[in-house]
Amino acid sequence: MSTQTTHKKFYSAEPVRSRLLSTLWQHQIQDGCISQAVIQELASQHQLSEIEIEGVATFYHFFHQQPAGKHTIYLNNSILSKLKGFERIKESFERETGARTGSTDPTGTFGLYATPCIGLSDQEPAALIDFYPFTNLNAVKVKEIIQKLKQGKSAAEICDAPLDNIRFTPANNRTVFFAPYTRGEALNKLNELKPEGVIEQLRISELAGRGGAFFPTWKKWDTCRSYKDTPKFIVCNADEGEPGTFKDRVLLNNQPGSVLEGMIIAGYTVGAEYGVIYLRGEYQWLVHKLENEISAFHESGLLGPDAGGLPGFNFDIRVEIGAGAYVCGEETALLESMEGKRGEPRTKWFYPVEKGYLQLPTVVNNVETFAAVARLIQMGSFEYLKRGMPGSPGTKLISISGDCQRPGIYEIEWGMTVAELLDLCGAEDPYFIQVSGPSGECISIKEKYRRISMLDLMAQKDIRCGGAFMIFNSHRDLVHILINFSEFFKHESCGVCTPCRAGNFIIERKLERLKNGLADMNDLKELKSWGTIMKATSRCGLGKTASNSVIQALEKFDDYFTSRFAATDNSTYRKFDHLSAIAEYEHYKP
Ligand SMILES: Cc1cc2nc3c(=O)[nH]c(=O)nc-3n(C[C@H](O)[C@H](O)[C@H](O)COP(=O)(O)O)c2cc1C
Ligand code: SF4
């Protein structure tokens, strides 16, 4: 399997249990699976029950209970990959390897699996082989790759280097993220600013978190700073699992120094000693780059004792690798995962700033937030405020994919309209646009004059974009897209709460009925009421947002659904039976 190295450094403040994910990775890589013998061994080492260890190992998609092949291939089955030829590529891999999707070939050389979005939506069809990236696949390329692997080459030797595809930055050097970078320039400001000055700069610049919730960064840091418990932690959320989103991948590849500087600034401001980058398993190919950058920071005195030349400020950063679970992007699930547990979101008695990692004060921020902090501190809030619009200063990174000529990363100033952005990327006959991934908002082309900003969320005048535009033209089947989204949420629900566990299953079944011409108005009403129940009663953002796109599509694409009903053959109509659907789910659930 993979030749990637997982980071083995842990801090003395961390308990042994925090190493569990890293240890499971080592076994997965060495043995191709987590065997029952390993589970027993780890249970005795950690003085935990076998069930507890097995519960963790089985939570994550990338840990297998049976050998997953000498070479393990993961194909992205997101809607964007499906539109770009997923089925063809799957057949090519099956033909060349002799493996059926979901299993290994008879010799155990190749394991072939489908997985949700791998963060390469601008270069689909794409796959990970032994966690190295292969992009823009076609049948000939697949054949060559498999031949080379059979000849003994490693995936590391023959993989692609994904392009950053930075397609647009604001004119007149107004880019925030992609200006020439000099290591340590932002940190040089800290001596003069002091923690209070950093908070003030963030407050003036109105920087809000880029992980989706737009929480004011200064408030989060100031609150964490106010807690006295030590040690404190800074966690960079690099789990980027929202299908269609790849902006953090590009930042980590293109601007790793800015991300590290943002984390160090956070550490200095709140009084933290330790930093952790929680990197999604799909981005392991970036580990060496990040570790090299961390080493360079150490060599320059920007990490370690008296980091950045600031007396008494000791700060270090390590990388933790996730193992395939979208819900681990939710900050409390991420912290559970770092503690070596199942990535199940916590009940929200406390915010992480008070009781986070190991129940200690922890700042969790998105990759883009940290990069923005470094640039903002370097240029000063006065300069930063010249970008964007009143109430939404600065710029925003947007990953664009789907039916357009120029998929890639767009750094826009807040205030740009949807129409301008569609024009920039060469959108082709845009009909259905999914903003911020499947959990976000879907819009129709009728809404093209809405601005992209942080304002007017309640009035729904402007659009808040978390980081992605997926563009679908009028020939794409809307129900097909929505089914793909609901399959994703069903697959990724951690299953702790019933509304999300059963609701996602029911939504998918109802969409299937719609696809098959069996749905009636009652089904649509029930789709909406399940959406409302899930929003109101789910524990975390996954369940609360999973029905967004379906509900909004029903409202905004009335013409499409009406034509679907016109095609309904009432003679075959069967009423949807919730109880038997739930019973069926309980039967089939993993
Ligand atoms: C299901 C789910 C997945 C999430 N995935 C991510 C993610 O991949 N990256 C991220 O930064 N935030 C993600 N979030 C939001 C985080 O919980 C958290 O709000 C964010 O990391 C805070 O950083 P920010 O203040 O810089 O936005 C997710 C939330 C939910 C509910
Ligand atoms: S809403 Fe879904 S993902 Fe979130 S805790 Fe409940 S079951 Fe888990």
Image (cartoon, grey):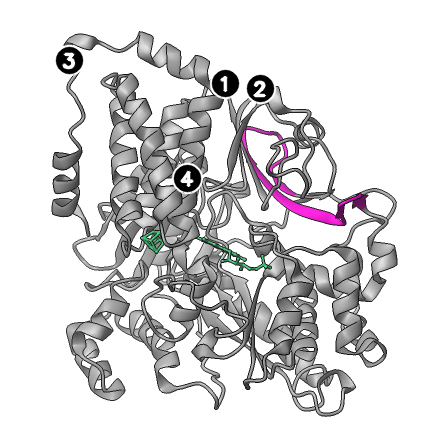
Residue of label 2: 429
Residue of label 4: 140
Residue of label 1: 474
- In the image, taking residue 146 as reference, residue 252 lies left or right, namely right
Q: Can the viewer see residue 394 in this picture?
A: yes
Q: Secondary structure at mark 3?
A: helix
Local packing at callout 2 (Cα closer than 10 Å; few below 14, some 14-19, many 20+) is some
- Of the residues shown, which amino acid type is indicated by label 4? Val
Residue 485 vertical position relative to residue 321 in the rendered view, above or below: above
Quarter occupied by the N terminus: bottom left
**Where in the figure is residue 246, as x and y percent of width and height?**
55, 49
- Of the residues shown, which amino acid type is indicated by label 3? Thr
- In the image, taking residue 197 as reference, residue 139 lies left or right, namely left
Secondary structure mostly taken by the magenta-highlighted segment of the chain: strand
Q: Residues in magenta?
A: 388-409
- Of the residues shown, which amino acid type is indicated by label 2? Asp
